[in-house]
Amino acid sequence: MSEGKQWITAEVELPQELLDAHAEGRVVFFVGAGASYAAPSSLPLFEDLAIALGAEAGKPYVKPAAGAGEPLDRFLGGLTHLTPPYAVHERAHATLTPTTSLPNDWHDTIVRLAAAYGHPRIVTTNFDDHLDAAATAAGVTFSDKWIGPALPLGHTVAGLVHLHGSVTRGHEELVLTDKDLGEAYLSEAWATRFLLRLFQENMVVFIGYGLTDPTMRYLTLGLPSGASLYAFERTSRASDPDWGRLGVTTIPFGEDFDN
């Protein structure tokens, strides 16, 4: 049994209604950058990625001392308007594909947990392919694989969905900037159409997201109220009232994503 599997079985108490829904095939696991942070994946969180790209572009991202700072997606969008324009998508693709990055215990735990009752259903906004590699190593088979904007119907989703693109495809398809997110969730709304039905008819469990992640704003504030949403969160942050504002029930797991 991997350390990740021990963590989920020994230290985390899952709500019974969530376990029941999972047994009925009504749970979708929604995976963010925190899952790919621990070694040997060692990939940056979204803020860390923005900081690295800003430094390379010669326009450092200034983290706010207190309160809200510039949204990370808007900051990345601004880099594309520099003179000369900075290749945000191409450089992000290169940053997220180091040859040394491998699946970690979180990926193993997630795919095993998702497959506990057969037919795993995982949606990720991560660009890396570590969940698929971890599934192969664990003998877990995804019934299908999708990469946005080519998505299944939300209420029938099965397998693995890369909502915001994948490094296995061209860098042009990565959803990174405010313009990218605006197209995906507002003007073209292909992500919104997919998520509306998914959230209406399933329980959703967020893993690897924080309150400051811009994806959480798009996914929770812009979608129907009354959805059954859960999130694994550090114990010290699990009681933050902002989770309640977003309509998310937290599941405390400890203090570090890499434990």
Image: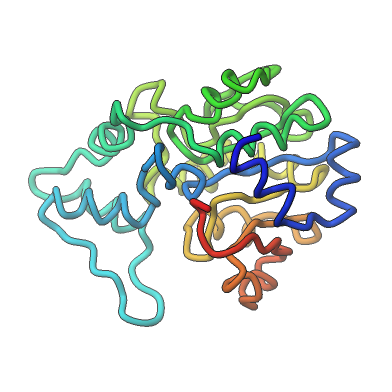
Query: In this rendering, is residue 208 above or below 243?
Result: above
Which residue corresponds to the image point at 69% horizontal and 64% vertical from the top-left? 250
Q: Where is residue 62 drawn, in percent x and y?
A: 23, 69
Q: Nearer the viewer, residue 98 or 3?
A: 3
Residue lying at the far front of the rendered structure: 1
Q: Where is residue 151 drawn, in percent x and y?
A: 61, 27
Side of 60 where 70 appears, left or right: right
Q: Where is residue 97 drawn, in percent x and y?
A: 32, 30
Query: In this rendering, is residue 41 above or below 33?
Result: above
Which residue corresponds to the image point at 29% horizontal and 70% vertical from the top-left? 63
Side of 109 where 89 appears, left or right: left
Side of 141 where 74 appears, left or right: left
Q: Nearer the viewer, residue 181 or 136?
A: 136
Which residue corresponds to the image point at 64% horizontal and 56% vertical from the top-left? 232
Q: Where is residue 167 drawn, in percent x and y?
A: 39, 27
The quarter of the image holding the N terminus is top right
Scheme by which the image is coloured: rainbow
Which residue corresponds to the image point at 40% horizontal and 21% vertical from the top-left? 169
